[in-house]
Amino acid sequence: MLEIKNLKASINNKQILKGLNILIKPGELHAIMGPNGSGKSTLANVLSGKEGYEVSGELKYQGKDLIKIPIDERAQKGIFLAFQYPTEIPGVNTNNFLKTSLNKIRKARGEKELDTLSFIKMIKEKSNELGMDEKMLSRQLNVGFSGGEKKKNEILQMKILNPNLAILDETDSGLDIDALKTVANGVNSTRNKDKSFLVITHYQRLLNYIKPDYVHVLTDGRIIKSGSMELAEQLEKSGYKGIN
Amino acid sequence: MSKHNIDKNKEYKYGFTTDIESIKAPRGLSENTIKFISEIKKEPRWMLEWRLKAYNRLKVSKEPDWQKPKFPKIDYQNLYYYSAPKSSKDKPKSLDEVDPKLIETYNKLGIPLNEQKKLSGVAVDAVFDSVSVATTYKDELTKKGIIFCPISEAIQKHPDLVKKYLGSVIPISDHYFATLNSAVFTDGSFVYIPPNTKCPMELSTYFRINASETGQFERTLIIADKGSYVSYLEGCTAPMRDENQLHAANVELIALDDAEIKYSTVQNWYPGDENGKGGIYNFVTKRGACRGKNSKISWTQVETGSAITWKYPSCILQGDNSVGEFYSIAITNNHQKADTGTKMIHLGKNTKSKIISKGISAGNADNTYRGLVDIGRKALNSRNYTQCDSLLMGNRCGAHTIPYIKNKNSSSTIEHEATTSKINEEQLFYCNQRGLNQEEAVSLIVNGFCKEVLQQLPMEFAVEAQKLVGISLEGSVG
C-alpha cells in the first residue's frame, strides 16, 4: 500500500525528517509514536502532499510514485488525513462540504455522484454508527465545535470517504475516554484486509482500543525502533528516553 | 479584440460582441445630442426641458474626485450618448418582431426572451445599449395593474407617475454623474406596483453594453404604492474592449406606507484584462426613499465586474418605523478597484438600518468600503447595525473600511463591527485534502465568507451568483 524509503523532508531549510523507512501492506495498521517535535505531523503532512516542504527519497503508494502528485489528487486516489487541528471554515455547511468532497472522490474513482437523498441516508447511517448527533452536520464546518466534536467529525468523514490509506494525526489527543472509544470504534469498524492505517499518537492509551500490527518509534526525524504492541507498552513505562 | 486577448480572458464568458447595425447620436455632449435623444424617443416637451435643465446644471458642476480609485480624465466630448440597434427604430410590437440577433445575444447570456423559453417566474426587461429590446410577461403583470416597461415607454404612457417621482429621490443637481445621467439617460426600467399588491414574480432587467465608445446611461424608477411588495433584480455584462467604457446609471426607489422593495444587483460588467487594460467604469447612483411609515427598502449587490466600481446604494428613512438594509459582496481581482458602500439616512422615528458588507480583494486589486450612517435629530429610538468584513488573497491587494457615523440624538444606537482576514492556508489544505482542487477550495471558502449576503438573493439567482464568485477569483491563489 505505502512504501517509504529514506524519506527526507525540510521546511524553511530546516530538516525535519531525516531518512525514514516504513512499509505498510494492505490490511495493516501501523502506529507511530514519538515525543513532541520528532516529526510526526510533518510525516502526516508530507504523506498527504502539503505544500511548502522539500521532499526527497522514495514515496510509493499502490506501487506508484507519490511525490509529484498534488494534495487533491492524492485524496482522490484514496489517501485520507484526519487532522490534528481540524480548521474552521465559516459559512460552509458541514453536510454540503462532505457531499462536495465525497462526490469529487467518487467521480475520480469512476463512480456515480450521490444525489442528496442517498447522501442524507448515508450520513444518517454513519453518524449513528458513531453515536453522533447528525444535527451537528447542519452547522458550519468545525465552527464552534468542541475538540471532541471536531475529532469525531474527522472520523465520520473517514468513514464516508472510505479511503484506502487513512492517516490519523493525533486524533486521540484532547479526547475524553468516551470520545476516545468512539474514535477507536470508527477505526475498528472500517478495518479490513484491503485498508491500511497509519495512526500517529503520543500515548499508548489509544492503542488499547485500536490494536496495531506494528509500532514505530519516531525520534528526531528517524524511526529508531519498530516492533509490536509490546513496544508501545514498554514506552508507556519507561518513556522515550528508555528506548535505545 | 485579438485572439490572444480572448484566450487570456477566457474567464469572462460574456466578452463577445454582437455584430449589429446601430443608430448613434452624434459624438459628443451638447444640446443637440440631448435633443437627438429626446426626439428619437418621441418624448414630450416637459421631458426635454427636464433634460436641458440638467444639462445646464452639468455645465457648472464638477466631477467629484474624493474617491479612492483614481482614473484618467474622461473625454466626454469623445463619447457616444446614444446607440441602438437599427432594427428597433420602429419599436417591435411583439417578441416575434425583435431582431433574431438580439434574441440570440440574450440566449448566449442565459436570458431567453422567447415566449416558450422565458425564465419561469421572472419577468425580464432586456436593455441593449440605449434601448429596451424586449419585456416578458407583460400581459400577466398588466392584469394585476402592475406596470413594468421601459422608462421611455412610461414617459409616453404614464407621464403623471414619471413627472411625480422622477428626480424626487436623486435630484438633477445631486452630483456630476447623476446630473449627467439626468441630461442624457437613454433607457432603463419603470416599475409601478399598485396599492396592496404583491408582485407575483421577480422583475428583472438585464443590461448589456455592446457598442464601442458608448456610454450607457440607464435610468430606473421603481414605485411601490401603499402596502405593496416587489422584488427586482438587475444583471449586467459587456464585451471585452481595450478602452474603458462609462456606465453612469441612476436608480430611484420609492416605497410608500407599508410597502417593501427588494432590489438585487448581480454586476458582472467586463472587468478589464489581467493587466488592468479596458473594463467598465461603473459610476452609479442608487437611492431609495422609504417615504411611507413602516416601509422597507433592501439593497443586495454582488459586484464582481467593472474596472472601477463606485457606488453607494442608499436609503433615506423618512417614514416612521421604516427599515433600510444593505447587503453587499464586492470582489476585486487583478487591477480592479471598488469604492462602494451605502448611506443610511435616518429621519423618521424608530427607523432601523442594517449593513452587511463583504469585500474580497485578490491580485493587485483595491477594495474600499465607505459608508455613512446618519441618524437625525428627530429620528428618535433608531438603530443601525453595521458589519464590514474584508478578505485578502495574496499580498499585493488592499482592503479599506471608511465608516462615517453621525448620531444626533441620544435615544438611538449605532453598532459597527469590522474584520479583516487573509484566506487561510490551513483552510485551503483542509479542502484540498478532501479532494477539492485549489479553485474549488477558494470558491467554497469565499462563498462561505459571503453566505449572509448570498442568501439574500432570490433563489433563481443565488446559484448563478455563487458560481460567479468562484469564477471571479480564478487563478488568484497558488
Image: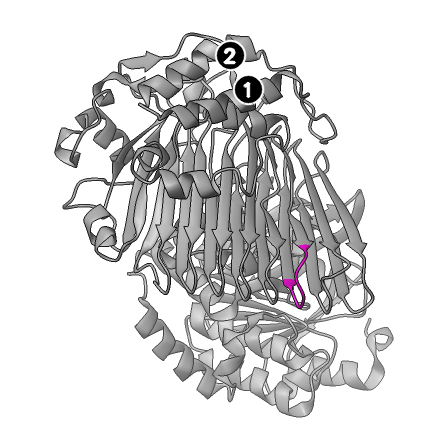
Query: Which residue is drawn at the image coordinates 60% and 39% (left, top)?
Result: B478
- Residue B96 seen in the figure: yes
Are dots 1 and 2 in contact, CB under 8 Å? yes
Mark 2 lies on residue: B29
Question: Vertically, is B436 above or below B393?
Answer: below
Q: Position of residue A69 (x, y in %)?
A: 52, 45
**Residue type at the position of mark 2:** Leu
The answer to which of A6 and B386 lies nearer the viewer is B386
Instruction: Give x and y (percent) for residue A218.
Output: 74, 66
Please report the bounds of the magenta region as a residue range. Answer: B346-352
Q: CA distance from mark 1 to mark 2?
A: 9 Å
Q: Chain of mark 2?
A: B
Q: Which mark is residue B55?
A: 1
Q: Residue at x 24, y 44 (%)?
A: B136
Image position of B186 with respect to B470: above or below:
above
From the viewer's side, name the closer residue of A80 and B198: B198
Q: What chain letter is assigned to the residue under label 1? A: B
Q: Nearer the viewer, mark 1 or mark 2?
A: 1
Which residue occupies 64% across, 76% down?
Answer: A145
Measuring from the top left, give residue B367's x and y in whole percent: 67, 39
Where B32 sits versus A238, above or below?
above
